[in-house]
Every structure is written in structure tokens, then in C-alpha cells.
Image: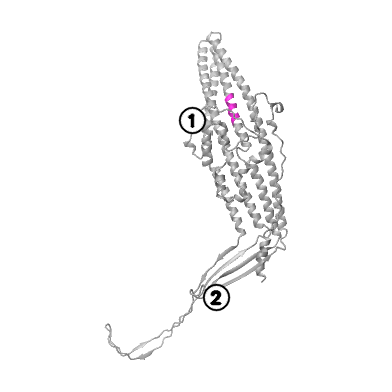
Amino acid sequence: MKTVHVLPFALLLTGCVVGPKYVAPTVPAPPAFKESLPPAYNGALPGAWQPASPQDAAIKGKWWEIFNEPELNALEEQVNIDNQNIAQYFENFMAARAIVSEARAGLFPTLTANGTASRGGAVIINNSKSSTTTSGTSGNSGNSSGSSSSTTSVSTSSGGISLPFDVSWEPDLWGRVRNTIRQAQYSAQVSAADLENERLTEQADLAEYFFEVRGEDALQDVYNRIVRAERTQLEITHALVETGIDAPTAIPQAEITLEEAEEAAAGIAGVRATYEHAIATLIGKPASGFSLPVKALATPLPAIPVGVPSELLQRRPDIAAAERVMAAANATIGIEQAAYYPSLSLTGSAGIEQTGLKALFTMPALFWSVGAAAAQTLFDAGLRNATMRQYEATYNADVAGYKQTILTAFQQVEDYIAELRVTSQQLNRQEAALSSAQTYVKLETGRYETGLDPYPNLITAQLTLLSSEEARATLRMNELTEAVELIQSLGGGWNVSQLPSPKSIRGSGVVQQVKDGP
């Protein structure tokens, strides 16, 4: 009778869950990014880049489309499909998702079956001789008037068949299994956030490499014109030396200048090839079979909405991952606290047993038994206390890591806003310098054509213009890559609402969402 009441009592106790209640720590956020304030507050010159207004117009979805580059858009789509780093992180998420199912199995009983069959017996042979008189004929033998015969007697006994089913279950009295499930769910969320962070990293790298390639194309054009100008200058120098106008030392000087320009032009081709190969790897293609056509860098700097710092906590997948790591560590503390309490194990067995198949399924062949056992650790030399201190310290370390991740995120946004603003100021000044260099070439061309200045003066003006164009191309390339870095520091188009919830971790829809991305 006592055994009958054990199960209901255990079911009532399954509502108890020990362990600290998880509350995410608060991290104070400033009201605004300092570097995004109007020029009067951040020292920016008039005309310098500023974040887009309104501030709450956050980037969503496919953030790279803000650059309005169809070629870049097509490459980014290939990253989401064929990038092997993203594929690896996705499989890591699938493994973490499977661990959740493994943990949930602990809530249910374990049923095993172990059928046996046996057969035994004995054979006894008894030989005896007797004399008999028979008569008859056979088509294959003659008459027989007598014979000697032996008799054999056999005794057998049959075996038995047993089909027992054993059931064992440990009720989750103190929430150890439920905390294990929560820990696995939170860890799966960490894996999902890591996947999105890796996806964002790969997307940003591709955009940066794309603009690097375009920037190198612009620089290559400038250096090709510089090389042509230097070759012309060398020819003129040879002519001047032959006529006695210039000293012989002018020739090696002109040759050095040309060789340096040719070396720089060759170096640009090597850098471009490196970025091109990196793009091929990002989209999951061999570098040997991939190439980008040469095009000028003509992408304008887009307006980038920055928002407020408090929104950053919801927009960066690395912050979401750090927060879920804390939640998992908190659940681990609950798992260990359950070790302080006694455990209860319920076992039962039932089955059928009989000596023959015909009677196997009759009522007398059925058997069953039920039992319960409780266990409590009385002495472990401080093992549980030491383990608790370990898990609590791990949780505190995760809290510090979470706060540091947020501080780093604030720093990165401020850094890239400042870098982008300063680069835009430099670009504005360089545009003014380029305009002056163009005026210089125009004036010098007129003086040369009217015979007022020699041709070397015109070459010098042209080289000055090309050098100014080189500086502008470099600044424009830096401006676009810094824009990508700013968007990445803002979390791209991701939001924490896209993170699968603990209850939906096992759903197939979540798998497709995480695989395809936002």
C-alpha cells in the first residue's frame, strides 16, 4: 500500500526548482553617442559626415543594400549560402539544439526489455536383447526365422520463455533535470547568437574587401597615369641632357622616380589580387576560378542611422551571446544545488513468463513488481561546496564578460563614428587640394603652350595632380570601409528578437530562420 502512494507524492515534488533566479544585470548606457552629436559639440568642421536623422531609423535586414551596389548585393547572397565558416557555426547550433533534446529525455522514464528463451532435457538409452520368432517375406530379403533387437527409451523436458519489461525513473524533485534543460536551451541560444555574429563578420569582411578592390582599381588607374607621366619626363630629361641644358645627374634621378612609380603600380596589382582571392573564399569558391572585373570606385557614402546606445544592447549578436552565457551559467548553479538534496529512484518491472508458447500470454504467465529507493550524500569531503564556488565564480566571470562586451561595443561605435567623420573631413580638404591641383595643371598647360614655361614644369604639375588623385582615392576607399565597420559595430540589420526563444529551440521553423539569417 505504501508503494502506491510514492508516485503521486513524487509528482507533487517535481514542481520544486532550486537555484538562484536569473536576472540579467543592468548596464547603464549614455543617452547618446558623443561622436554623433552635432558639429558644435564634437568639434567637426562644417560639411563633415554626420549620422542619419532621425536617429531611430535603424538599419534592418540586408544592411549592405544601403550602398546600392548590385554586384555587392549578389556576392552577399552567396556568402549566406556558400560560406563554410557560416556552415560550420550552423552545424554547431544544430549540435547544441540536439543537446536540448538529450536533456529533455531526463524528464521521462526509461523502459527496457530483455527477453530470454531456454530449452533443456535429457536422453536415456537402454539397450536389451530378446529372442523372437517371426515369419514373412520381403522383396528385398529372404525369410528370417529370428533376430536379435535392441530398444531405446528417450526422456525429455521442455524449457521456458521470459519477456520482462523494466522501468526506471528518477523524479525531478529539485529541478536538476529542468535546470539542465534550461542550461542546454540557453547554450543553444548562445550558439545561435554566435552564428549570427559570424554571419555578420563574414558579410562585413566581404563588403570591406569589395570596396578595397574597387579602391585598388582607382589607385591602379592613377599609378598607370603616373608611370606614363614619369616615362615622358625621362624622355624629356634625356633630350635636355643631350642638348646640354640639364646635367647628366638628372637622368638617374628621373630613372629612380620612374622605377619607384612602376614598383608602386605593380604592388597595387598584388594587393588587389589578395582581396579578390579573399572574396572568393568568403563566397565558398576556389580563388583560382574567381575574378572581379576592373571598375572605378564610384560608390557614394550612404547615410547611416546610428541610434542611441541603449538600442545597441538589442542589436549586437555578441552582446546577446554574452547575456545568454550568463543565463546558462546561472542554470548550472541550480543543477549543482540539487545535489544537496536527496534523490528518489522508482523502479518497476512487468512481463510474461511461461514454459511454452501456447500458455505464454495467459493470465497466470504475467508478473510485476514495483520498488523505490532514496539516496542522500552524507559526506563528500567538501566536493559539493567546492563545485558550487566554482560555478558561482564562473557566473561572476560571465557577468564581467557581459559588461565588458557592452563597453567594447560602445567604444567601437564611438571609434568608427569618429574615424568616419575625420576621414570625411580629410576627404573634403583633399577635394579642395585636388581642385587646386587641377587649376595648377590648367595654368601650367597654358604657360607651356605660350612658351612661358618649359615642359618639365608641366610634367611637375601633372604629377602633383596625380598624387592628389591618389590621396583622394585612398580616402574614399577608407571612408567606405569605415562605413562598413560602423554598420558592423551597430549589429548590421540584426535584432535580439530574431534570436530563437528557449521553447522554440526544437522547432523546425527556428532551424530554417537561423540557417537563412534575417
Amino acid of disc 2: Pro
Q: Residue at x 48, y 33 (%)?
A: 291
Describe the element under mark 1 as helix, strand or loop: loop
Q: Residue at x 65, y 69 (%)?
A: 4
Which residues, given as a range, are shown in magenta? Answer: 472-480
> Where's residue 58, x and y in %?
63, 35
Q: Earlier in the sequence, mark 1 or mark 2?
A: 1
Does the magenta segment cover residue 476? yes
Q: Is residue 113 left or right of residue 313?
A: left
Mark 1 crowd level (few <14, some 14–19, many ≥20, 10 Å Cα): few
Which quadrant holds residue 312? top right
Residue 267 seen in the figure: no
Label 1, label 2: how far apart the Cα atoms are: 85 Å
Q: Is residue 185 above or below residue 374?
A: above
Q: Is residue 373 above or below residue 448?
A: below
Per the picture, the main secondary structure of the magenta-coloured stretch is helix
Q: Which residue is mark 2?
A: 364
Which quadrant holds residue 481? top right
Does the magenta segment cover residue 169? no
Q: Residue at x 59, y 24 (%)?
A: 472
Describe the element under mark 2 as helix, strand or loop: helix
> Where's residue 10, x and y in %?
67, 63
Q: Identify the coloring.
A: one colour
